[in-house]
Amino acid sequence: MERTHLYDWHKMHGDVIPFAGWEMPVRYSDIRDEHMAVRDAVGIFDTSHMFRFFIKGPQASEFLQRMTTNNVSKLEVNGGHYTTCLNENGGIRDDLMLYRIDADEYIWVTNAANGPKIREHLVKHSKSFDVQVQDRSSEIAMIAVQGPKALHLLSKMAGRDLNEYSRFTCNPVKIAGYDTYLCRTGYTGEDGAEVLILNCPLTNEGKKRAIGFWEALLSQGSEFGATPCGLGARDSTRLEAGLVLYGHELDEDTSPIEARIPYAVKFKVEPHYIGYDIVKSHKEVGVKKTRIGFVMTDRGIPRENYPILLNGQVIGQTTSGGVSPILNNGIGLGYVPPDLVNIGDVIEIDIKGRHRKAKVTEWPFYDPQRYGATRTG
């Protein structure tokens, strides 16, 4: 099992479990409390298990245009976007964040479980371009700071207002004396940032540096309600926001159009990315399955791989499920044939042999005026 820079702290303070080949904290206290800290204040997550590839060279943009589905040519220096990497059949190899840190240099942040296969994929295809792919995961720690007070905390630590950096940007920023990249993105539905802490090799000294930054977030964030959060709250917040998770909503047999993440896909972009024709046909002709969200109206907690029924007939399967602390109710995501159900329709979820009613709904599952990055109140 692999361990992040912060493992020693997690082992001392949290409940550590195996996850995607890593020993990671699932919780430190109560998952619901950690979840609500993210929604109401600020939650701090160790995301160092994700892979960080630096891609540099005169043809870096052309290379990434071939390898990813969003329009790299539109990505300005210090900008970032969400995108996917596909196989030849239009299935998703991984979803990722891509940041442009210089004219010819990018950071590709990919999921922990997919890191080795994506590294191999990038190195293989880079041979046709004037570009270098470097895996710098082990020398850079990564911590997500999420919630409505996240920027207040990070601004305090930086000694200046970091709200000058808008969402989906990536900038070099000195925070509490640490050299970092402040990436104004996240995976909870809330505002905040993912902070890449430089010069943190997996040595005793590097681990101490990473833990020092983590503890500074907690100590300086006490006035903002800063709370350490584990994988449990990371999953419940992303599910409540309706965000996809690789291995659940996304896999190599599912296209971005089927997953309903069209914002990650652009067309009429040269060179065409791998899987372009298949995804374009899904957009123009249609798909055989589509992602839906639902809220339980009967008692019951949905989990992954539960049958979805309509009028007593199985029509699909859940991919994620759990309890929304905001709604205090079961929620879930799944796939069904297109045009079979609409928002507001009643379906059933087979929960351990019992058919429980649910209502098809859009995501996020919370009121976006009260919660999330676009909240108005």
Image (cartoon, rainbow, N blue to C red):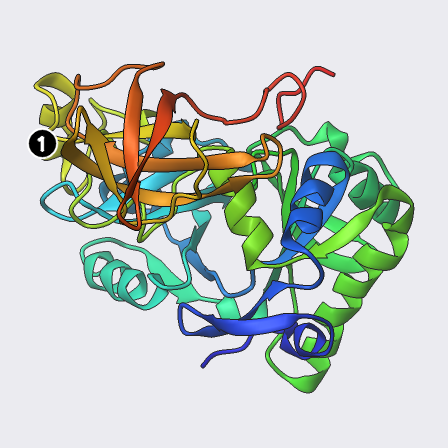
Q: Is residue 258 left or right of residue 38?
A: left
- What percent of the width, then of the height, locates residue 108? 43, 51
Residue sitting nearer the eye, 131 or 204: 204
* Residue 258 visible in rendering: no
- What percent of the width, then of the height, locates residue 29? 71, 61
- Quadrant assignment, res 214: bottom right
Residue sitting nearer the eye, 21 or 79: 21
Q: Is residue 93 left or right of residue 209?
A: left
- Element type at mark 1: helix
- What percent of the width, then of the height, locates residue 196? 62, 56
Q: Is residue 175 left or right of residue 47?
A: right
Above or below, 263 against 273 in this view is above
- Quadrant assignment, res 278: top left
Which corner quadrant holds the N terminus?
Answer: bottom left
Q: Write down the residue under mark 1.
A: 277
Residue type at mark 1 is Asp
- What percent of the width, then of the height, locates residue 42? 74, 43
For label 1, the crowd category at 10 Å Cα-Cα, with few meaning under 14, some 14 to 19 and many 20 or more, is some
